[in-house]
Image (cartoon, rainbow, N blue to C red):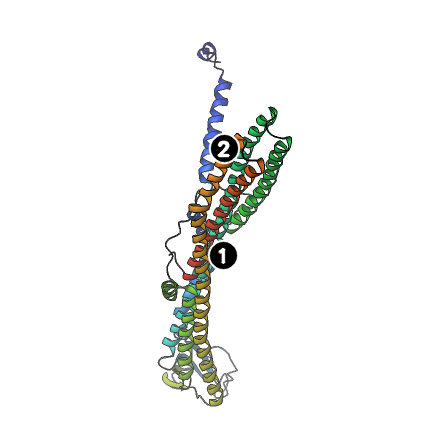
Amino acid sequence: MDARLVRSGKSPWRLAAVAVSLALWTQFGMAAEDVPGKTVDELLAYAREHNPDLRVRRLDAQAQHERVESASALPDPKFQVELMDFTNAMTPGKSASLLPGEVGTTRYRVIQGFPFPGKRGLRGEVAEALAGQADTSHDTARLDLEGKIKTAYARYFQAVGQSRILNETLQLVGALEHLVVQRYSVGLVPQQDAVRAQSESTSLKVDLVESERRRRDAAAKLNALLPRDADAPLAEPVRLATIPPSPTLVQVFARAKEISPDLSRERLGVDAAEKGKDLTYLNRYPDFGVALTNNRPRSEMIGPQTWDLMLEVNIPLQQSSRRAQEREAGYRLDAARERVAAAEARLNGRLGETLAGLNASVDKARLLRDTLLPQARATLDAAQAGYESGRVNFNTLIEAERQILRARLALLDAEVDANIRQAELEQLVGAPL
């Protein structure tokens, strides 16, 4: 052991323990900073990076885009080898053979098919529309996930806020209970006031246990969306998202018609159906094939090498089948257009319902915050002063305390409901407002 450490009275074991404690404290502090949950933006960023459902949709969209090139590409050419007179009947003394060059004539042929002009382009356009639908499906899944996270975060904030309000109310009731006990000890109030104060405190503790259960449940649901383990720690939420001034239904619907992924998907379905119909009508016309053949006799004594050029055309003979396909394509186009109209009507109704709920929640929160809660606090102050002077009974004091509790919880519920309605509205529109 170092003599200097002995003289200073500091054992190296004590120094090691201090160093370990500092390391653990630093590690704990860093881990606490990494825990998400303070704001909804942190949770959204985490989910966009780690949620497997979004990765699946993204990969599906990328796979669909890779089909565009293949849909408009030429078909692969064909190569043929034809053995003429492989029995060598025309060559005395030769037995049958399956080897090129050992038969009467060997033909090497390359065949390339060509669709009727315009078909390749239409096939590529149909594939592009379907790829666009895959992109909108990814956007829809992302918006749905973000809406669920915003709702779960609001519920988590609500549960934490309820616990905080109940704890603060419990402290208030504790102070009232202390006042009652003092006045009871000198005979100024009856015993039932002290019992009533204790009963109110116990009731609040029961409500606090239930609020803690709701907090754990909300945290588990929020972790499941990120995704994380259900019991993974979450930071205490700091604030709800700010509610911007409410737009009109006409403004919201106009913007939703421009950027809503649901409507975009249906419109792309119309594009795909239109291109599919045009492609079906082009099937009335034939496709082509061009073949180039090299004829090689077994020996130049039989004859020289020759080249053949062949043109192939398929015959669109089954006209009744094609007419049925054209009628089918027409019906599919009509159905796609009707789906757009139905989606717009459905979206307009949901926007109106959500916007009405948002405005009602905002108005309710404003009345509770600016009117009812100040009145309840003034009532409690007056009741407490009256109880101390003996002009007001304890029931009036407890009722004033309960009125503040109900007002604070109602205000929290209204703010959370407005936040959830705002998240639903943004999900329907397709972007933040």
**Residue 377: percent from left, percent from top:** 47, 39
Q: Quadrant of the C terminus?
A: bottom left
Tell me the CA gap for discs 1 and 2: 59 Å
The residue at which mark 1 appears reads as 53
N-term-proximal mark, 1 vs 2: 1
Q: Which amino acid does the dot numbered 2 rest on?
A: Ala
Q: Is residue 124 above or below residue 230?
A: below
Query: SS for tag 1?
Result: helix
Q: Nearer the viewer, residue 53 or 261?
A: 261
Whether residue 66 is visible, yes or no, is no
Q: Is residue 256 above or below residue 121?
A: above
Residue drawn 49% across and 44% down? 408
Disc marking residue 385: 2
Estimate how packed mark 1 is, as few (under 14), some (14 to 19) or many (20 or more) residues with alpha carbons within 10 Å.
some
Image spot of residue 52 (x, y percent): 49, 54
Q: Nearer the viewer, residue 158 or 320?
A: 158
Q: Is 350 above or below relative to 93?
A: above
Look at label 1 and name its amino acid.
Asp
Comparing 53 with 397, the one in front is 397
Q: In this rendering, does residue 176 appear at all?
A: yes
**Residue located farthest toward the front when viewing the structure as drawn:** 391
